[in-house]
Amino acid sequence: MLKRVHFGSSWLPFALVAPQIIITVVFFIWPASQALYQSLLVEDAFGLSSEFVWFDNFIELFGDEHYLGAFQRTIFFSFSVAFLSMSFALTLAAMADRVIKGATTYRTFLIWPYAVAPVVSGALWVFMFDPTLGIFTYTLGALGYEWNHKLNGGEAMFLVIVASAWKQVAYNFLFFLAAMQSIPKSLIEAAAIDGAGPTRRFFSIILPLISPTTFFLMVINVVFAFFETFGIVHAVTQGGPAKATEILVYKVFNDGFIGLDLGGSAAQSVILMLIVISLTVIQFRYVEKRVEY
Amino acid sequence: MIEHRPMVTFVSHLVLIFGVAIIAFPIWITFVASTHEAARMVQIPLPLLPGDQFFNNLELTLFKGLQGAGAPPVGFMMVNSLVMALMIAVGKIAISLISAFAIVYFKFPFRMGFFWMIFITLMLPVEVRILPTFEVVANLGMLNTYWGLSIPLIASATATFMFRQVFLTIPDELLEAARIDGAGPMRFFVDILVPLSRTNIAALFVILFIYGWNQYLWPLLVTTDQSMYTVVMGIKQMLEAAEQSPDWHQIMMTSLLAMLPPVFVVVFMQRLFVKGLTETEK
C-alpha cells in the first residue's frame, strides 16, 4: 500500500497526518476510552464520589428487563426496517431493470428521499398520522379504525418503522439496480432461449447473482436502523408510549442526558460499540469475498 | 429487451409509477400543507390540493419564525445549517486528502499505526459515545460555536480510504517525472494529485454535504443558544410546540426548506451523487 516510488521520512508526513490524528484522538479515542472507564464506575447521585465496581454495571444491565426489552425492540425494529425497505426497493429495481424507456426518470424520482434528514422524515409521517388532523388518521377513521399512536404502542412502532423504511428505499433501490445492471445480458438471454419467463429468470438467475449485494444492504440497513434512526424516534414518539419505541440508541441518550445515570449509560455505549465493531467486521469480510460474474 | 412482451412492460411501468407515487406522497402532502393558511390547516379533512398562501407562508417562516415556540426565524437557522454543512464537508475532504497523501507517498515511522488509528473512527459513531464526547467539547469551551458543531465530526475513515484507493491507481511515472522536473512533495500534491482526484473530491463533497446538513443528535447536544440552532433541529422544537398550537402550515414549510438544499444537490448532481455513494460505502 506504500507507493514503490515515494518520499523519505521528514517532519512533513507527520504534519500532514497531524490534523486527522489529533481530531481522532481528542474526539474519538479519548471519549471512547472514557466511556470504557466510566462503564466500570458507579457514581453517587451528586457526582461527588465514584467507586470502581468492575462489571457490575453490565451485570445490572443484563438483569434489567427494561434494557433487555429495548434490545429485543431494537432487533425487531431493525429487521422490520431492513425487510420492508429492501423488499420494496427490490421490486422497483426489478421493474426498472426491465423497462428501457424512462429508467433514469424513475431513478431520479425514487432516489431523493435519501437526502431527507431522519428528523424531517419523522415530521412528515407524524403529520400524516396526527391523531386529530392527520390525513391517514382521517382515512382510517372513515374506514372505522381509530388511529392514535400516542396511546397505542404497536401503532407507534409501526409509524417509526415506516418513517425509517421510507427514507432507506432510495439507497437500496440504487444498489439493487446497479447490481442487476451489472449482470451480463448473455446469461439472461441464454435463460430466455431455454424458455424461462421473466418471473423464472428473476428467481433463478437474477436473485442468486445479486445475493452479495442483498447481504451487503442487509448489514447497511441494520446499521442504519440501529444508529441513525435516533432523529426519527425523537421526533415521532420520544420512545413512548410507555417505552414501546425506546430503541438502544435512544435509551443511551435518555439515561445519560435526561436520567444522568453515567455508569449505566457508559456501559450501554460500550455494548453499542461492540455491536458496531462486529457489524463493521462482517461488512469488511463481505467486501473481501466479492463475487465475480 | 430480451423478448417482446408488451403486457409485462406495461405492468412494470405501472408498478414503478405506483412506487414513485408512494415515495412522493409524503412530500406532496408537505408541499400542500405549506400552501394553506393556518385556519385551513385545522379543518378536517386536511386539503389534498395546494392553496395560494405559499409565498405568504414562505415569508413568514423565513423571516419571522414560529410565533409562540420562541424559535429564531428559519432563514437564520438555514444559514447556520449551511455553515455547518460546508465546514464539515470541506474539513473532512481537506484533512482526509492530506492524511491519505502522507500514508501513500511517504515512508515514515508509525505509518501503519496512524492508518489503524484512523480506521478505528469508523467503529465509533457519535451515537455510541455521546456523553464523553460532549464532555470533551464542553471542556474545550466549544459549546455553541460553529467549531463545536463541526470539528468533532470531521475525522473520516471512509474519505481517507477513498483517497488512498484513488492515489494507489495513479501511475508511479508521474511522481518520477515530477521529481526530475524538480518538484517537491507539496508541489506534486497541489499540481498533480489534487487535480487528478477532482471528480472524486466533487462526488465526496456531495455525499458529505448531505451528511453535514442532516446532522441532528450532535447539534442538539452542543447548542443551547438559539442563535446556533440548525434548521433540522428547529423542526423538532416546532413539533413540540405543535402539541399546544398546531401551526402545521409553518412546520411543513420549515420541513420543505430543510430538505430543499440536500434534495437539490441529489437531483441536480445525480451522477456525482451515485458515484460518491458507491465509492464511499465499500
Image (tube, coloured by chain):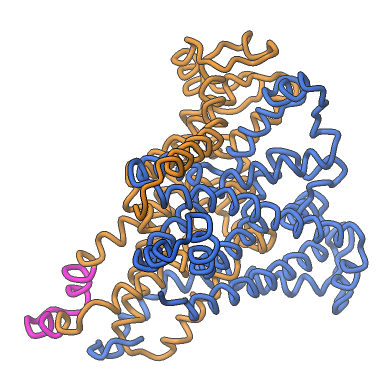
Chain colours: A blue, B orange
Question: Can you see residue B14?
Answer: yes
Q: Where in the figure is residue A223, as x and y percent of width and height?
A: 62, 61
Magenta residues span B176-193
Q: Nearer the viewer, residue B234 or B49?
A: B49
Please say if B89 is above or below B42: below
Which residue is situated farthest in the left direction here?
B181
Which of B25/A123 is in front? Answer: B25
Kindly identify the residue that appears in the image at 75 percent across and 21 percent down.
Answer: B244
Residue at the (83%, 61%) spot, across then down: A47
Q: In this view, does B24 lie above or below B41?
A: below
Closer to the camera in the image, B164 or A98 = A98
Q: Is residue B152 visible?
A: no
Location of residue B229 in the rendering, given as x and y in whole percent from the top left corner: 56, 38
A189 left or right of A208? left
* Number of on-image labels: 0
Main SS, magenta region, reads helix
Percent position (x, y) of residue B64?
52, 19
Image coordinates of residue A1 in percent, x first then y, are 36, 86
Q: Magenta includes B185?
A: yes
Q: In which quarter of the image is residue A283?
A: bottom right
Q: Quadrant of residue A133?
A: top right
- Is B133 in the magenta? no
